[in-house]
Amino acid sequence: MPSSGRCCPGPASADDASRPIHQLRVYEVFDDTREAFHDRFRDHAARIMPKYGFEIVAIRDSHGDDGRPQFVYLLEWPDEPAMREGWEKFMADEEWAEIKRVTAREHGRFVGDIDERVLSPADYSPRMSFLRD
């Protein structure tokens, strides 16, 4: 089938400057604490994060090239300053700090390497509404 040579919508419109950014985070998780990690993220982190502007768009399980399990999630932010401020406040949250202390004492280490990417839309990027349930 012939191609028009275009994969996506045309040049950016005036409102594209206000499009959000996304943050992709990939955590190496350990088999022996994986279930407890998911419990902690679901029951606590995902509950506390919205207080600081976090919008969780997607949560997935994956495996690295080495076969190790990974926890992957995608966040949406209005801009990078909001992202930095949100993380700063979340990491200073007393409830979250106590939850991490308690769960580390009970289960040990949950996370190994963390990879993080900030994703800014290209001027021809389609909107990401397909991720919404």
Image (tube, rainbow, N blue to C red):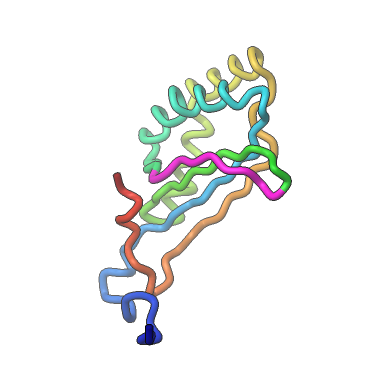
Per the image, is 59 magenta? Answer: yes
Q: Which residues are magenta?
A: 57-65
Q: Residue at x 37, y 35 (%)?
A: 50
What percent of the width, then of the height, locates residue 37? 56, 26
Q: Quadrant of the C terminus?
A: top left
Closer to the camera, 122 or 68?
68
What percent of the width, then of the height, locates residue 119? 48, 60
Q: Main secondary structure of the magenta part?
A: strand
Q: Residue at x 62, y 48 (%)?
A: 115
Q: Residue at x 46, y 47 (%)?
A: 74
What percent of the width, then of the height, locates residue 97? 55, 23
- The image quadrant of residue 2 is bottom left
Closer to the camera, 95 or 123?
123
Per the image, is 80 magenta? Answer: no
What percent of the width, then of the height, locates residue 89? 47, 36
Position of residue 72 in the picture relative to residue 48 (left or right): right
